[in-house]
Each structure stands twice: as structure tokens, then as C-alpha cells.
Amino acid sequence: MRIAVFGTGSVGRALSGRLAGLGHKVMMGTRDVAATSVRKEKDMYGGPSFSEWYSSNKEINLGTFADAAVYGDIILNATNGNGAVAVLSQAGNGINGKTLIDITNPLDYSQGMPPVIIPSLMNTNSLGEEIQRTFPLVKVVKALNTMWNGLMINPEMLANGDHHVFICGNDEDAKNQTKAMLREFGWKDTSILDLGDITASRGIELILPLWLRLMMAFGNGAFNFKIQKMGQ
Amino acid sequence: MRIAVFGTGSVGRALSGRLAGLGHKVMMGTRDVAATSVRKEKDMYGGPSFSEWYSSNKEINLGTFADAAVYGDIILNATNGNGAVAVLSQAGNGINGKTLIDITNPLDYSQGMPPVIIPSLMNTNSLGEEIQRTFPLVKVVKALNTMWNGLMINPEMLANGDHHVFICGNDEDAKNQTKAMLREFGWKDTSILDLGDITASRGIELILPLWLRLMMAFGNGAFNFKIQKMGQ
């Protein structure tokens, strides 16, 4: 499969590397290809710069958001939440009719840690819904936004995969495509909780403040939510 | 111990009945004792009316919020979130210097299901913090607000107690009192996650929208969050 990954930060890199390793063809999308490809700053967690990472992942393509949108049979959105709608506008018509797995969170880091939630994208709205509303021809599926990227792509590294990924969206085929990709990453069917239509993004996105608080308490992100149910 | 429980709904009743069963002396607090004691409406889940319930729990006392505040060595706040600050104002000086375990959520059900979060009590604020700020002489501990009341008082009925209760607050002694009560209910130490000061209420309260969505998906509230951690 040909897959577009929007965003070149730690989440975009983790997803792109894993998908390429699984044998998919990947194009990462960015605003300015020339600038991104020579970027030398360490990432926010002190990891390698994009240019370092990219030089050891030569099988992955890099293009504009529009290039990647046209390239991908399916699109993963791993951009910053506060710019996600603008990025998708730059991607143009190539996104139409395709499944877009949206991993973003409506967080504003401009005031420091912990980030605040963007008020217009919470409670009676969410970033998942805002994207679906703004781009009605795209099949938006919210998924994977509630955990550290290491677990997104390798859930079995924690408790043999016994924890949950929440997904939601309006299109059943798009959700089935998403579930198929999650299974490739190692997610068991029993660990994928489909919560219905895209309005479920409201709840799924609002657990980020607790996730961040837990990360601060534990000192790392190597944990995840499990929903413990009666009789299981 | 003498314990005050503010609120006569399903949460207040579950806590009061369990605490009395454990041998504590309990006084429930309500706005209008005469009106509450003859209340005949079924509760919101179709359970018994307060007067029915109360007639079979005669060992439990009923008083005004102010009566109960003076009576209790410790106070449990199980009122509706949108009236919680007003109720505590009615309780008067009896609450000062005491531990108040706050189980409320800042939810507004006036527009139907699912409820919305009260905008002034989220993101950069929370109901736990609002109560602590409004009543600085009270030792507020947020706890138990993230689950069905059946699990609050009997966690072992689900997965042998292998799921979590989140607590936070500014006063260590008050948190220790809260943990002691949680242990009496059946919570193991490893299932009590202390997230620090009262500002952690922000994250703890904001998982309610996901909880409500899960309840709608499962058709019941007999589930809870577990934080799955590496190496456990």
C-alpha cells in the first residue's frame, strides 16, 4: 500500500519507519521539503534531527503535503493539533475520498507545559470533528492519539498488548482500513475499541490532560489506558 | 469515625450505606430535610426513591448540609457538580479544617445526554480546584469521580480490584485519610494513583466524557480505567 504521513516530528517518524518496515511505500508530507530535509535541530525529546533520521531511512519519500496527499492510498495525520486544519488545506484535493487517520490533539503548547486544550476544539466540538466538518469529502478516523508513539506502532511491548486504542469515525470502510493497519502494528482485535461516529473524538481527545499528568508523575510515556470490563 | 455525606442521590446512598456497613456513623446532608425524607420519585436510573431507600437504612442520619458538616470528622461531597460550590456555602463553617473528599464532576445535564462540561470549570481550572480556592480552610481531595458508584465502594467486584482510582489534593494528611477510606472499601495500594496537588483534578475530571461514551457503547457502567504500566 502507498501511505502518506503528514508531519515529520516524532510521531510521523515512528509511523513512517514502522510502515516502511512492514513493506509499505511511504511519503511523508511537510510544508517546505528543502527546509525540512536539512533540518538540524534535535526533536523536543532530544532525539535525532530530521536530517539525521532521514539519512538513515532513505526508503521513505519526502514531499509537500499536496504531493503526499496525491501519493497515498491512505493518509495519516501526525501534525501539530493547532495547525492541523491549515495543513490539510495546503494538501489540496488529493485528500478527497481517502481515509485520513487523525492522530492529532487540540493542544496549545505556546504557554509552556502542561499545554492547554484549544477552547474552540473541546467539549461540544473536537479536532476530529472540526477536520471532518471542514473536509467533508475526507473519511476521518480518530485513532492512536492517546498514547506514546512507541506504543502506537508496537503495542505488544507493554503487557503483551493488553491495553486499548480508541477509534471513531463516520465511515465504516475507513474504520475497517484503520483496524487493518492497527493489526499490522500488532494490535489485537480485543484491544481496539470502536466508539462509534466522529463525535466520540470529544471524549477521546479530552483524556490527554490526564495522560500528560500521568507522564509527569511516572517520568516516561511507556504506559497506556486499559478499559477493565466485567467478565473479561 | 463520624462521616458526613453531602448529597442523597445514587452516589451519596452507595457511599453512606457502605460506610455504615463498615461500622462508621454517617449523616447525609441535604438542602431540606423534611422534603428529602419524603421524596417519592425514582432515581435517574429507576432505582428506589429516597424515602424507600431511607426507610431500610435507618442507622443513617439525615440532616442539613450544616448539620452534617458539624457532625462529620470527614466529609464526602457527592452533590451535583453544577451546584457543588453553592451547597458547600450552605454548609457553613463546619467544613473548615476538615478533609473533604470531592467526588463531583463539572457536568451540566440541562441540555440532555450526553452532558456538557461547564466551560469555566475545565482546561485551566477544574471543580476540585474551584472548591479548594473558594474554601481555602477545607482540605480538598479529589477522588472516585471517574467510575460507577458500585465500583467506588466495592472495587473487587471488577477484575479482582485490578483497576485504578485517581486522587489528588494539596494536603498530605487529607490524602492519607482518603487512602485509608479507600482501603476500607477494598482498594489495594497499587490501585490508588496519587497524582499530586489539586490541579491534577483538571485531567481527572476531563475523562468523564470518555467514560460516558464508553458507558453508552457498553450499555452499563461496570467498567473502569486501568493504567497499564511497563514492568507490572
Image (cartoon, coloured by chain):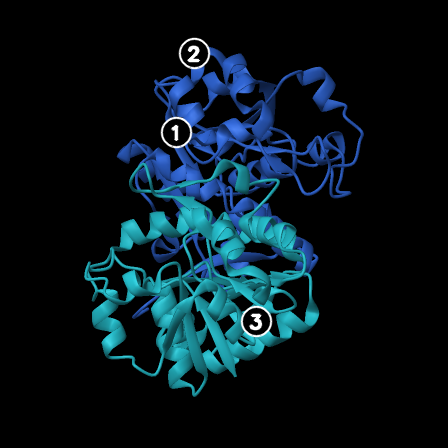
Chain colours: A blue, B cyan
Q: Are marks 1 and 3 in contact (CB under 8 Å)?
A: no
- Using residue B212 as the reference point, say whether residue B176 is left or right of it: right
Looking at the rendered image, the quarter that the C terminus of chain B falls into is bottom right
Q: Chain of mark 1?
A: A
Marking on residue B193:
none
Assess disc 3: are there few (<14), some (14-19) or many (≥20) residues with their C-alpha within 10 Å of its C-alpha.
few
Q: Which residue is mark 2?
A: A93
Circle 2: element type: helix
Q: Is residue A140 above or below residue B123?
A: above
Instruction: Report how far apart the C-alphas of labels 2 and 1 lie in the structure.
Output: 15 Å
Q: Quadrant of residue A53?
A: top right
Amino acid carrying mark 2 in the image: Asn
Circle 1: element type: strand
Q: Chain of mark 2?
A: A
Assess disc 1: are there few (<14), some (14-19) or many (≥20) residues with their C-alpha within 10 Å of its C-alpha.
many
Can you give x and y, in whole percent of width and height, for residue B156 in the image?
40, 78
Give B196 or A32, whichever is nearer the viewer. B196
Q: Chain of mark 3?
A: B
**What residue sits 62% from the left and 50% below the top?**
B134
Instruction: Report how far apart the C-alphas of labels 3 and 2 lie in the structure.
Output: 47 Å
- Is residue A228 visible in the rendered image? The answer is no
Amino acid carrying mark 3 in the image: Gln
Instruction: Report how far apart the C-alphas of labels 1 and 3 lie in the structure.
Output: 35 Å
Q: Which residue is mark 1?
A: A140
Q: Which residue is mark 3?
A: B232
Q: Are marks 3 and 2 in contact (CB under 8 Å)?
A: no
Give B66 or A99, whichever is nearer the viewer. B66
Disc 3 with disc 2 on a shared chain: no
Can you give x and y, in whole percent of width and height, for residue B145 in the image?
46, 59
**What residue sits 49% from the left and 29% below the top?**
A121
Amino acid carrying mark 1 in the image: Val
